[in-house]
Amino acid sequence: DIQLTQSPSSLSASVGDRVTITCRASQSIGSYLNWYQQKPGKAPKLLIYAASSLQSGVPSRFSGSGSGTDFTLTFSSLQPEDFATYYCQQSYSTPKTFGPGTKVEIK
Amino acid sequence: QVQLQESGPGLVKPSQTLSLTCTVSGGSISSGSYYWSWIRQPAGKGLEWIGRIYTSGSTNYNPSLRSRVTISADTSKNQFSLKLNSMTAADTAVYYCARDRHSVGPTLGGFDYWGQGTLVTVSS
């Protein structure tokens, strides 16, 4: 199985901050990396697919980059509605796996 | 707009079999561009992919659950289902169904539509 790690596991930030979350894969997965946002009591929402492509309807303040084993999700300017938990997920092979999540909290 | 809705019992006794159904609207599960997956999430924890089914009926399962899982589909009802046997307290979780984009394509995969989730508790 491909293992995904995320850092940090949690962070505190202020509205307007530029924030970066990282995801590392246990082996090269090319660009087969997706990012999700999950708010309490809700299903995850796809934000970024293929490492850097913005899912339809997702604000442009979200961006993704990386390939191979190292990936990042960046918020250019954190907004109040962005406080949530973020997961990376690999679609390179089965079993599909997710990272452990990064919780973004208000400072 | 594609919508998915899970249904099934919220309480299952230990050793029994969980049966959940996902009803899809706004799109056909017979579309060749997608798999249809089940994913679960214990309270306060991360996401675990359980398995998926393709329009052809072929399935893939998480090896950690393979011996206990069966995923099937009823194209006439536009539904797919999950059966998980020998349930224990460790299987208590919110169970989601999701549309799984084919990795062989421009999107390289990803779960783009999800059901709202259904909480399943294993308790006597």
Image (cartoon, grey):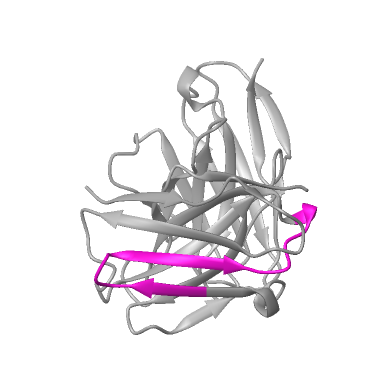
Whether residue A68 appears in this view of the structure is: no
B86 horizontally vs A98: left or right? right
Q: Count the marks: how many? A: 0
In which quadrant of the rendered view does residue A3 lie? bottom right
Q: Is residue B76 magenta?
A: yes
> In the image, is residue A107 above or below residue A94?
above
Give percent across and percent down for residue B29. 29, 68
> In the image, is residue A26 above or below residue A20?
below
In which quadrant of the rendered view does residue A49 lie? bottom left
Q: Residue at x 50, y 45 (%)?
A: B117
Q: Nearer the viewer, residue B70 or B44?
A: B70
Q: Nearer the viewer, residue A33 or B6?
A: B6
Q: Nearer the viewer, residue A38 or B2?
A: B2
Q: Is residue A21 magenta?
A: no
B59 horizontally vs B93: left or right? left
A101 horizontally vs A35: left or right? right
Q: Residue at x 46, y 30 (%)?
A: A76
Q: Nearer the viewer, residue A49 or B41?
A: B41
Whether residue A5 appears in this view of the structure is: yes
Give percent across and percent down for residue B37. 47, 65
Q: Which residues are magenta?
A: B71-90
Give percent across and percent down for residue B80. 40, 66
Q: Residue at x 53, y 38 (%)?
A: A38
Give percent across and percent down for residue B54. 38, 77
